[in-house]
Amino acid sequence: MTVTNGLRCETVPLRRLAISRIDTLIIVGGGRDGIVAAISDDRLRQWVVKAALQVRRLASVCSGAFALAHWGLLRTRRATTHWSAAETFQKYYPAVRVEADSLYVKDGNVWTSGGVTSGIDMSLAMVEADHGRWLATRIARQLVLTARRVGNQAQYSFELKAQAGRYAELVEWIRRNMGRRLDLVMLAARAGESERTFSRGFKAQTSATPARFVETLRLQAAQHRLEGGASVKATARAVGFASPEHLSRVFKRRLAMSPLEYRRAHIGDR
């Protein structure tokens, strides 16, 4: 089948695929039965392992990372997969350095992504690496994406997980009061619990300590404001960071880039 932009979508036997003509090989994911069948296919394994030595770039989407790991192509590398399968992935492939929160991970010429939509983010990053930011941004607009996401953004939100738990009202209050000082003493009192009980209960509900949770909400709010064109100084003040320098330290630690670099990645230099 040939689509309107001229690209051909077709399936062909492996024996007809010339590895020398492949630039980027992407192993897609699927349901449990499908990925188990793929992993168990020895002819497929042999072909992919051979191709991995020759292609310029090797990648996976979602559970496709299980195939790459099973075939020994992710050993000692940094990688990710869908967050819901990350624990299982790490259990079966301990030699892989799993970054469960990342949308996608690039380690040398090997790329892995989380879910289906993060595969789009990974693909746009590949386009930018090959052809520059202008083209990647133009494609993102054509796909009606509200914003391009960098690989080390989290796959899922702690906030979404907490909204279904017993601290839902507290989470909403935190979200509306991020400009305030939100320390453990205040949050525990707000929840009506001792600090120790609150710390244990909150982490059980959200998979994050109260401090990590508040920092994550502030970071997400800062990202949203920077994507809208706000200055770094105004952003830091609005979301509760002590200073622009504090905001920068968190961005560097959590996203491996400065707030200004993040802003430019989404809106350019305007």
Image: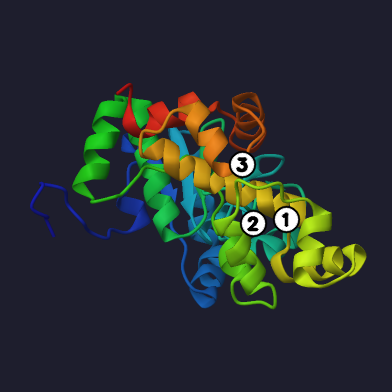
Q: N-terminal of the two: label 1 or label 3?
A: 1
Contact check, label 1 and label 2, Cβ < 8 Å: yes
Give 50 or 122, whichever is nearer the viewer: 122
Q: Position of residue 8 (x, y in %)?
A: 17, 52
Q: Quadrant of the C terminus?
A: top left
Q: Residue at x 64, y 53 (%)?
A: 100
Front position in the image: 191 or 19 = 191
Specify the amino acid type for callout 1: Tyr
Residue plotted at (38% across, 35% down): 126
Q: Which residue is mark 2?
A: 70
Query: Which of the 4 image quarters holds residue 190?
Result: bottom right
Q: Is residue 30 above or below residue 232?
A: below
Q: Earlier in the sequence, mark 3 or mark 2?
A: 2
Tell us which disc is closer to us: 1 or 2: 1
Q: Quadrant of the N terminus?
A: bottom left
Q: Secondary structure at mark 2?
A: helix
Q: Nearer the viewer, residue 210 or 116?
A: 210
Residue 72 visible in rendering: no
Q: Please name the amino acid that badge 3 sits on.
A: Gly
> Mark on residue 240?
3
Crowding near the residue tagged with mark 3, few <14, some 14–19, many ≥20 C-alpha atoms within 10 Å: many
